[in-house]
Image (spheres, grey):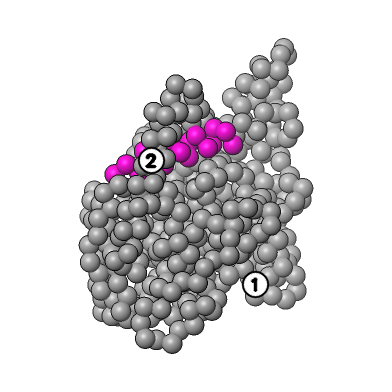
């Protein structure tokens, strides 16, 4: 087993029968596993062992899955490359010497390397779709509220969702079937409404069947909106690969037209203000008193608290806590946080408008191919801007899927489909046509 993919290798056996019997699963290391350490890729939680299972883990076990390890990740989910992990970076099995994407890089790499059949990640601003695109696998970011977040160590509560990775759209959909649905432990979950738009042609596909049933590959009559803003500034080879995939879908009976999402030019700024603000309050609980790393400091509690956090958190996490705390501070709340929430409402409205005239929207998942290892660490801003195509979807609470679209210069390129809230079936159906 590749040691840079997993932070902890383990075997957690599931039940004997179930839809995932004989299936191995890698679980991102910010999802609680009872009795198996859950580190979030941080020194702060290096020895933390949760006393309970996340809801998604309970559901995996009930479905008969075998969990083979806790996969590497950017510290507390903060990063686009899996290089901010306290345990070191993960290499990209699909493009050695390059990053696997982040923050769920270990989960995507586990699937790409064949270390697990499927995997779970979490997506706050692209952290499932980015590594799926970079590692040449399928990743689904579900609608906010479809999958329980109980037992997920929080980074940005209003943005994040747990979702599946797999080598095929159908396998990812099968994993989604297991983990989706309301949970009494998470008040943000809800029963998905019936998606009338899932059946855009005269085929007699079962719309209200399972998610896996939706992977029919039938896109005859599908209307695809292509947001021009999400192609601007993207790498030439990525754009070329994207249009080749759209042409392939056209050959199968889909049609595309251009749409505009003017608000997305402010989406990255709004996203980082909201995500960092939520992170600064979520990470306040790591104080060295109850669990996690505790510094040895003679003197008063304030010193111990400060030193614990100084030693326990890496640079990227500190950067985000500081920026988030600043954005929420007394004189700046309206100037930054409130403005970001207004921008979020604008992004939602833009997506609603664009999806009123298309079944799905399509863009490159990432505007660039995978970076070389070490390349982006010197320039955090470059890393933040790489999220330009993924973060707007989280701001709008919508579902999205990344599916392999081909390669540029031998490096994987992903295509992202975005759908209306709880429109997962139509995304699965559209994506399965590219396999």
Question: Callout 1 environment at 10 Å: few (<14), some (14 to 19), or many (20+)?
Answer: many
**Magenta segment, which residues?**
265-282
Q: Residue at x 66, y 38 (%)?
A: 45
Relative to 148, residue 22 above or below: below
Q: Magenta region's main secondary structure? A: helix
Judge whether residue 278 is colored magenta: yes
Is residue 322 shown to the viewer in this render?
A: no
Please give left or right for residue 238 compared with residue 340 in the image. Answer: left
Instruction: Report the side of 267 relative to 233 (left or right).
Output: right
Relative to the observer, which residue lies in front, 377 or 257? 257
Q: Residue at x 71, y 13 (%)?
A: 300
The residue wearing badge 1 is 20
Task: Tell which of 174 and 420 is nearer to you.
Answer: 420
Looking at the figure, which quarter contains the C terminus? bottom left
Q: Nearer the viewer, residue 432 or 284?
A: 284
N-terminal-most mark, 2 or 1:
1
Mark 2: secondary structure: helix
Q: Select label 2 or label 1 by which is in front.
A: 2
Residue 408: % across, % down: 29, 60
């Amino acid at each position: 087993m590749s040691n840079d993919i997993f932070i902890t290798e383990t075997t957690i056996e599931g039940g004997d029968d179930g839809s995932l019997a004989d299936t191995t699963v890698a679980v991102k290391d910010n999802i609680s596993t009872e009795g198996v350490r859950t580190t979030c890729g941080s020194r702060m939680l290096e020895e933390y062992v949760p006393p309970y299972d996340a809801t998604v883990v309970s559901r995996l076990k009930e479905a008969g899955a075998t969990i083979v390890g806790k996969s590497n990740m950017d510290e507390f989910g903060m990063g686009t490359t899996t290089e901010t992990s306290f345990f070191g970076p993960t290499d990209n099995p699909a493009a050695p010497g390059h990053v696997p994407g982040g923050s769920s890089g270990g989960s995507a790499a586990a699937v790409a390397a064949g270390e697990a059949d499927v995997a779970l990640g979490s997506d706050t601003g692209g952290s499932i779709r980015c590594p799926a695109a970079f590692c040449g696998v399928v990743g689904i970011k579900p609608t906010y509220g479809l999958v329980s977040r109980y037992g997920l160590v929080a980074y940005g509560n209003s943005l994040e969702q747990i979702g599946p990775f797999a080598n095929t759209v159908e396998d990812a959909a099968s994993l989604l079937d297991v983990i989706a649905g309301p949970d009494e432990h998470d008040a943000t979950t809800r029963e998905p409404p019936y998606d009338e738009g899932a059946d855009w042609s005269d085929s007699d596909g079962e719309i209200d069947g399972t998610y896996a049933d939706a992977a029919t590959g039938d896109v005859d009559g599908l209307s695809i909106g292509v947001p021009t803003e999400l192609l601007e500034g993207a790498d030439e080879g990525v754009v070329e690969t994207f249009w080749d995939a759209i042409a392939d879908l056209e050959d199968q009976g889909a049609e595309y037209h251009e749409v505009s999402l003017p608000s997305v030019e402010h989406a990255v700024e709004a996203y980082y203000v909201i995500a960092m603000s939520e992170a600064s309050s979520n990470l306040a609980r790591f104080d060295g008193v109850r669990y996690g790393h505790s510094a040895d400091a003679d003197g008063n509690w304030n010193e111990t608290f400060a030193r614990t956090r100084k030693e326990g958190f890496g640079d990227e996490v500190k950067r985000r806590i500081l920026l988030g705390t600043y954005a929420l501070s007394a004189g700046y709340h309206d100037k930054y946080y409130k403005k970001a929430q207004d921008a979020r409402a604008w992004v939602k409205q833009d997506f609603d408008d664009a999806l009123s005239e298309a079944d799905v929207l399509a863009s490159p998942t990432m505007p660039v191919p995978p970076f070389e290892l070490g390349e982006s660490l010197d320039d955090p801003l470059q890393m933040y801007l790489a999220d330009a195509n993924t973060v707007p979807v989280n701001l709008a609470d919508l579902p999205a899927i990344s599916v392999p679209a081909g390669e540029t210069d031998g490096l994987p390129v992903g295509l992202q489909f975005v759908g209306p809230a709880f429109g997962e079936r139509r995304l699965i159906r559209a994506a399965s046509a590219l396999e």
